[in-house]
Image (tube, helix red, strand yellow):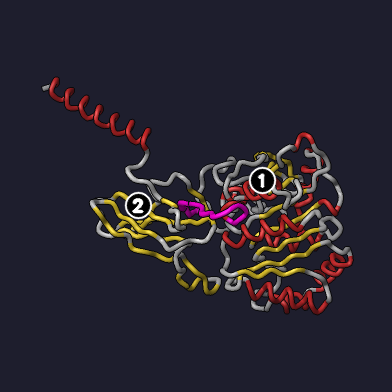
Amino acid sequence: MKKSLLSIALSAMTLFTAYAQEALWSGSQVTSPVVNADGTVTFNVVAPQAKKVEVTGDFLTPVEVDTPFGKSTQPGKAEMKQNNGVWSFTSQKLLPELYSYNVIIDGMSILDPSNVYVNRDIASLTSIFIVTEKKGDKGDIYQVNEVPHGDVAKVWYDSPTLKMQRRLTVYTPAGYDKGKDYPVMYLLHGAGGDEDAWTTLGRAAQIMDNLIATGKAKPMIVVMPNGNTNCQAAPGAWSRGMYMPSFRGSIGQPALASMDESFMDIVNYVESHYKVAKDKKHRAVCGLSMGGGHSFAISRRYPDTFDYVGLFSAGLHIGGSQQKSFYQALKDNKEVQGQLDRLFKAKPALYWIAIGKTDFLYEQNTDLRKYLDEKGYPYKYRETDGGHIWRNWRIYLSEFAQMIFK
């Protein structure tokens, strides 16, 4: 009896090992996604026992939903068709872009089992793929090309204002060691994000590599801090451990200071550890959503420090009643009025506002533009289709990087 049980166990182990080796060497039983020559994309999922399989992603027609912040959109869905246990769906021709998606099997959303390329956005994981048609299109700019590559480092700096060690992501361009006096772009993430967001979801390193290699952007250092000032680093990357990321992006005790109050700790670290020029015309600050709000506040607080300011779908807050329109809040706040007056008297080389037509923060940004217009403060404005999405923010980074340090 013992011999029989041992034989069964060994046979089971052999079968498991053989299956594991097959999976190791050949990957999944199907390929997915497949970017076809005509620009369509085919998704394949092996699920012979499933009753219904769908794909949901930002390449499908979005669905409008109500949120606590107003109307928003969610990715659309499409049903997949089964053939011998393999479920498939082929999209329409897709424009060059980076796309995110998930598979839904009998109501349960999962990553595509055949796609190892994944992004985390706050607490959501999605599979990703890139479509490109020709050199220089969006897909091409977002992918890794055969060009000189910069380096991306995770570095720790001391923040005396926040009384803690904190982590930055720093991009240095190809050939950094041979140069000096580089300009610096400080690139800030949105709510729920961290110092990893722009290099994963935003494709910042690929964008900068490709723009610099083609001469469309100046070689520059890009500094991506963590905007949650009561956190040291991204979830799992500091002593608080592997906690669940949240929209607020932070846990624990209240912060000792705001992002704008503590921001010069970051600038001082960068200018004492990297080969950078230390004057206004070689500094830019920009960010998306919460990071756009941070950029709005930082540029006001330090009017002689940054020559280039970029607000990407900015979440604009200056305290006081949230029932007021942002325009009225500006009109009522003498301190902020004075800060903006000093900022524009310092004549920034570029003050750039960009937002999507259906972004839930559109009205706030329209209010800011109304106030700036009344004061005669110069700025440039960029409006795109779509809402509060990474697809827009990658566009804004790509365009802003080409306009600065000229």
Q: Is residue 245 above or below residue 293?
A: above
Rendering coords of residue 322 (x, y %): 65, 74
Q: Secondary structure at mark 2?
A: strand
Find out whether residue 403 is within the magenta segment: no
Q: Are marks 2 and 1 in contact (CB under 8 Å)?
A: no
User: Which residue is nearer to you in this view: 227 or 406?
Assistant: 406
Q: Is residue 66 above or below residue 193?
A: below
Q: Is residue 333 above or below residue 226?
A: below
Q: Is residue 335 above or below residue 270?
A: below
Task: Say which amino acid is labelled 1.
Answer: Asp
Q: Secondary structure at mark 1?
A: helix
* Disc 2 residue crowd, few under 14, some 14–19, many 20+, Cα 10 Å: many
The residue identified by callout 1 is 209
Task: Say which amino acid is labelled 2.
Answer: Asn
How far apart are the two marked residues, 2 and 1, measured between alpha carbons? Answer: 32 Å
Rendering coords of residue 167 (x, y %): 66, 43
x 47%, y 46%: residue: 117
User: Which residue is nearer to you in this view: 150 or 7?
Assistant: 150
Q: What are the residue bounds of the magenta stretch?
A: 122-138
Rendering coords of residue 85 (x, y %): 25, 51
Find out whether residue 123 is within the magenta segment: yes
x 86%, y 58%: residue: 304
| 16 relative to 206 in the view: left or right | left
x 48%, y 48%: residue: 118
x 37%, y 33%: residue: 25
Residue 44: mark in rendering: 2
User: Which residue is nearer to you in this view: 236 or 253?
Assistant: 236
Rendering coords of residue 203 (x, y %): 60, 50
- Residue 4 occupies which quadrant of the picture? top left
